[in-house]
Image (cartoon, coloured by chain):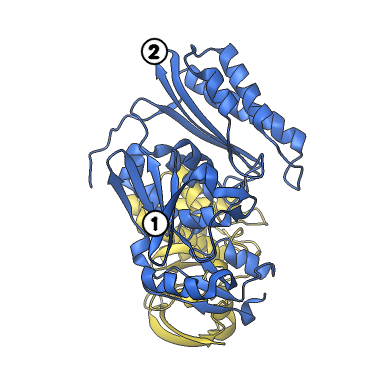
Chain colours: A yellow, B blue
Amino acid sequence: MEVNVSFNLNGKKVSVTAPPAKSLLRVLREDLGITSVKPGCEAGECGACSVLLDGQVVTSCLVMISQVDGKNVITVEGLQKDGELDPLQKSFIDEGATQCGYCTPGFIISAKGLLNENPNPTDEEILEGVSGNICRCGAYPRIFNAIKKVVKKNVI
Amino acid sequence: MSYEKVEVYSPRSLAEALEILSQKKEHIKPVAGGTDVMVMLKDGVVKEKELLNLSYISELSYIKEKESRILIGAATKYREIRRSPIINAYAPILIEAVRQIGSPQIQNLGTIGGNLGTASPAGDSIPPLYVLNARVKLQKIGTSREVQIDKFFLGPRKTVKEPDELITEISVDKMEPGSYYFFEKLGLRSANAISIVSAAGIINLENKTVKYLRLSLGAVAPTVIRATDAEEEAKGKELSEDLIDRIAKLASEATKPISDIRGTAEYRKKATYGIVYEALYRIFKGYGKKIEYGFEKTS
């Protein structure tokens, strides 16, 4: 009882055979070697497994692989361009916005999803944009600053 | 049932989906956004061996006007509801609820039909649907029927939907211009919290006199309920602190809450009074949200 699904992962076409109700999270980690997506709660509450699905941020633990056929999936592995980190990634490094790092890829993807749709979010919109992500170390102020810095550059 | 043993059907059209349902009936479970079903699957509480994946059926995702009603396809995501000019213009109370239903991640996956199918008394889109006089369209091969929202739910996770029927559309009243509205929710976190108590209300005032109040309460009874005694009490009376107190008391009396991990029954009764009082008091003092039909029609 397996299904074959083809989709675009970080700009490359991939094909995978898996149980049809297996989560995108588990397929990415176990079948495709993408380990930036983290299994936290696996109930859609912590955001550590966030990916961009056709440009929109979703928790990959809640998506069945059967729902991904023909779609575009972006993880942090796909954010860099020509060896250059994405401005968000750089900003997270500059601001020291990580502590243990488990939540970091999810936060960066949520911020990316937000800025794709709204390059100049207000502070409130930034907070809402990452409201689905939890950081148990409590690095929230630095995470907010890291995103805010990229937004300020967007404005200029 | 663990995910490894589950078969998934992924029809590309509604006709195909209804055909599969007619054959499999209670042995197959429809899945739209997956935000509930995937968690149930992880917890091993899905009894069906097969899932019907509705995410490729684009004909079930739409928002359109039909005279004084708005029609919403069952697989319309919260994301689309929130961004819809029609909903923003004519049913903004639904936007209030969708904003609080979950994180961006959940809003980008979850659907309004899914919230009805899950039939949790704490489902946040449901109280607004009660005060918008929603009807649920249930379709099966060759026929369909419409059910009033307050006749749709039988209890927690129980509805009148037959196994060979699919929720295909939700229709709601457009709100009258000048109406005040609110959706209030108590939860442990701004995103992704399950409601401990929620309330949705539409109140239409003529000068200070209540033309009508529609008030619904979530997570305080086996299904979402309309607080009809409170609505009756308000009708034709001048809005005052005294009246608001009586309305909130009647709302609290209408509840039949349980005690669970999120709160005790006693707390839920008191909190119902509190959120209804506060929401109406804000309107009374001139800080409430009001619908103005400010948007241009985009059709």
Q: Name the residue: 34% across, 48% down.
A: B84
Residue B225 rendering spot, x and y as whole percentages:
59, 38
Question: Between tags 1 and 2, which lies in front?
Answer: 2
Residue behind mark 1: A115
Residue B166 rendering spot, x and y as whole percentages:
47, 62
Residue type, label 2: Asn
Asked where in the image residue B258 lies, by quadrant, the reply is top right
Q: Tell me: B107 left or right of A142.
A: left
Circle 1 Cα neighbour tier, 10 Å, few/some/many (<14 / 14–19 / ≥20): some
**Numbered-mark total:** 2
Q: Name the residue: 70% across, 37% down.
A: B256
Q: Name the residue: 49% across, 48% down.
A: A128
Viewport quadrant of the N terminus of chain B: bottom right
- Can you say whether B15 is above or below A152 in the image? below
Residue type, label 1: Leu
Of residue A28 and residue B111, the one placed in the foreground of this image is B111
Secondary structure under the numbered disc 2 in the rendered image? loop
Q: Tell me: A122 left or right of A39.
A: left
Secondary structure under the numbered disc 1 in the rendered image? helix
Asked where in the image residue B210 lies, by quadrant, the reply is top left
Of residue B25 and residue B156, the one placed in the foreground of this image is B25
Residue behind mark 2: B207
Residue A138 numbered mark, or none:
none
Give how far apart the Cα atoms at labels 1 and 2 are. 44 Å
